[in-house]
Amino acid sequence: MKKFLSIIFVIAIVLNGAYSFAVDVNFQTGFNYDWWESNKDDRGRQFYIPVQIGSEYENFSFLLQTAYIYAKLNPSNRQGNLQPEDVSLKDVIDTKINFSYELLDKFPIDILFGLDFNLPTGRTQLRTKELALILDPDLVSIHRFGEGFNINPTATFVKEWENWAAGMGVGYVWRGEYDYSSEINDYDPGDIFSLTGEIDYRFSPAWETRFFAEYAHYSKDQVDDVDFYHEGELLLIGVGFEYEQTTWDTALTLRSLFRDKSKLQSETLKLLTENQNSHGDEWIADFVFRYFVNPETTFKSALQFLWIEENDYDYDHSLFIGKKEKVTLELAVSRYFNPYFEAELNLKGFILEAEKNPFHPDGDYDYKGISIGANFTSRF
């Protein structure tokens, strides 16, 4: 908690300095509570307080994000333990910082430069029992508590003409070394090179569609300077449709993710391409509807379907990951009070069916969960 208060103090200094130079600043905080349980009587919950500060000055922008989290896991006694041990953690997560600069209307294309940092303010070197808190990201909002010092420069190029718009981005994430757990020290995750692209077309003042894609290449993960794992390349493709009216709008987005085979450490400590693909293809559909009650109040509903195919390994293989199906429904209301303050309340619920995987290798699981949150934004 002291670390979190120190970060808040730094944010206050930044806010005061930005205000002195007449920079547009917004400060956002609130709370979020996640709860879930399985059909095997496992239960977990997270409560976190996010903090975000953003500012703009001419073509420059700045964004800082962090949060204070309390996470707890209550395992069942299906393993024969009369009193299974609960595990909890409370700490600050890593702090994200973004700087960006826009070059608009100066060249045939607009250019956006970005520079992101991950500051290792979170928890690493987890104890053995705390590793159980690193959960499936489909169960909780925050599934990673800390990493190393990361740097991510990006460049985005955009061109608009008539009813068309096209953009392309390139980025590189340099991920620093850190101690993953009390038993795995000097963990060096692989760097990431990425390419993104998007084409938008507006059929009419009401209808717009977009096609987008992303490619990512990963370098090798190492532990104590020894090659440990090499993630396969990733390809994401998608299409989106948007329809706008005076009092409401809606959007439908369809995405597919495909991953290549990874390389695993062999008995000789060399990386070998796996015999089968340990990644199943992933399909996601998002439907969003917003209703504008008046200029100050907006209702939002969102429905997401997630389907991940089982991978190519046999069911009894240690690397088998079964199919996963998830449905999520979110309801939210936001209120604009004045130019200096707005708020949003949201409620989310999900059901998840997941076959055997590394998070629960003993069989198939069904989950259900809810999230309740509120965000408050102030502008200076």
Image (spheres, grey):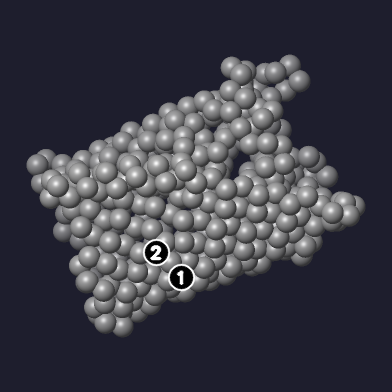
Near-viewer residue (14 or 221): 14
The reply to whether the C-beta atoms of the residues labelled 1 and 2 are less than 8 Å apart is yes
Eye-nearest disc, 1 or 2: 2
Q: Amino acid at mark 1?
A: Asn
Q: Where is residue 361 shown, x and y percent of the image? A: 78, 47
Q: Residue at x 27, y 44 (%)?
A: 13
Near-viewer residue (309 or 334): 334
Q: In this rendering, does residue 250 appear at all?
A: no
Near-viewer residue (240 or 246): 246
Task: Establish if 108 lies above or below 296.
Answer: above
Q: Which mark is residue 357?
A: none
Q: Which mark is residue 346?
A: 1
Task: Establish if 20 lies above or below 301.
Answer: above
Give how far apart the Cα atoms at labels 1 and 2 are: 9 Å
Badge 1: how crowded within 10 Å, few (<14), some, or many (20+)? some
Q: Where is residue 234 shown, x and y percent of the image? A: 51, 40
Q: Where is residue 373 shown, x and y percent of the image? A: 47, 66
Q: Which mark is residue 375?
A: 2
Q: Residue at x 31, y 83 (%)?
A: 293
- Relative placement, left or right, of 361 versus 257 is right
Tell me the quarter of the picture where residue 140 sits.
Answer: bottom right
- Tell me the element at label 2: strand
- Relative placement, left or right, of 314 versus 140 is right
